Amino acid sequence: MEFFLDTASLDQIQHYQGLGLVDGVTTNPALLAKEGRDPLGQLREIASIVTGPVSAEVVTTDPERMIRDAQKLAGVAENIVVKIPASTAGLAAAYQLQKQKVPLIITLNFHAAQTVPFIKLEVDYVAVFIGRTEDFGIDNKQLAWDTRLAIDNMQSRTQLMAASIRNPDYLIDAISANVDVITVPPECWKKVYKNPIFELAEREFLESWQQLPEDLRRAYETLDDTISSQS
Ligand code: G3P
C-alpha cells in the first residue's frame, strides 16, 4: 500500500518527504490554483522533487482536447500521471490514451459503476472520492470496498486509489478496504496528530513524572551512566 500526498504545495511536500509519507503526489486544478503560481511551473517543480508518480489533471470537458492535453502533460516529466475525469468524455479520451500508453488516473469517481469501463481498459489508477460526499450528507465509505471488489472480480491490473481523505476515519476506512494507494491531504495528517485525548494523556504522564524529586529523575533523564557502561 502506498501513501501519496494530496497537495500542490512544495513546502508541504518537502515537509512530509521528511516523514516518509510521500510515495507520490496528487494534484488537481483546485490544488494547483490554490498555490497562486504558474501551474505548469509548479507542476514541473513538484515532479522534480518527487521520485514517485505526480498527477496532473486535464482542465477541459472536451474529449479531443483531453487527449491532446494529456499527451502534453505526460511529456512534462517522466513521473507525470495524467488525471482524466470519470465521465463519458473521459472514457472516450482514456480509450485512445490507453492505446498510446499514456499513464492515467481516472478521477472524480463517486460511484463504483463509474470505474467499471476504466477498470476494463486496465488504466493505471482509478481514484475514488470518499470524503467529498459529506458535503451533501452522504456517507460514501462503501465506495472503496465496492471498487476493490470490482477490480478483483474483473481481474484487472488497475490500482485502486482512495482520495478525498478529509479525516483520520476515512484514512482507516481506505486501509480497511485494502486500496493500493491512499492520497492524503496534509490537513488530514495534521488532524491525525491533533488528538485532544492524546494531548491530555501525554501531559498527564509528564506531569506525573515531574512529581518525582529531581535527584531521583536525573539518572533516567540523563542516561549518561547507561551509555558509558555499554560502551
Ligand atoms: O485528489 C483528489 C482530492 O484532492 C479531492 O479531495 O476533499 O477536495 O474532494 P476533496
Image: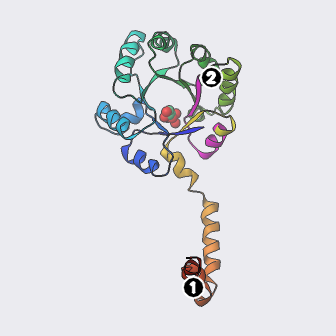
In the picture, measured across the screen, residue 8 lies left or right of residue 218, that is left
Query: Which of the labelled discs sits on residue 196, or is there none?
Result: none
- Position of residue 144 measured from the top left corner of the image (x, y, whole percent): 65, 30
For image coordinates 56% across by 13% down, the residue present is 121
Q: Is residue 197 above or below residue 131?
A: below
- Position of residue 150 measured from the top left corner of the image (x, y, whole percent): 68, 21
Image quarter in which the N terminus is found: top right
Q: Quadrant of residue 40?
A: top left
In the picture, measured across the screen, residue 210 lies left or right of residue 145, that is left
Helix or strand or loop: what does disc 2 sit on? loop
Determine if the magenta segment contains residue 163. Answer: yes
Q: Mark 1 — residue?
A: 218
In the image, 203 versus 83, the foreground residue is: 83
Name the kind of residue labelled 1 in the image.
Arg
In the picture, measured across the screen, residue 226 lies left or right of residue 79, that is right
* Residue range of the region highlighted in magenta in the rendering: 158-174
For image coordinates 57% across by 83% down, the residue present is 225
Q: Mark 2 — residue?
A: 111
Crowd class of label 2 (few under 14; some 14 to 19; many from 20; radius 10 Å): some
For discs 2 and 1, the disc positioned in front in the rendered view: 1
Q: Quadrant of residue 32?
A: top left
Q: Is residue 114 above or below residue 183?
A: above
- Position of residue 104 measured from the top left corner of the image (x, y, whole percent): 48, 22
In the image, 146 versus 156, the foreground residue is: 156
Give the spatial CA distance, label 2 vs label 1: 59 Å
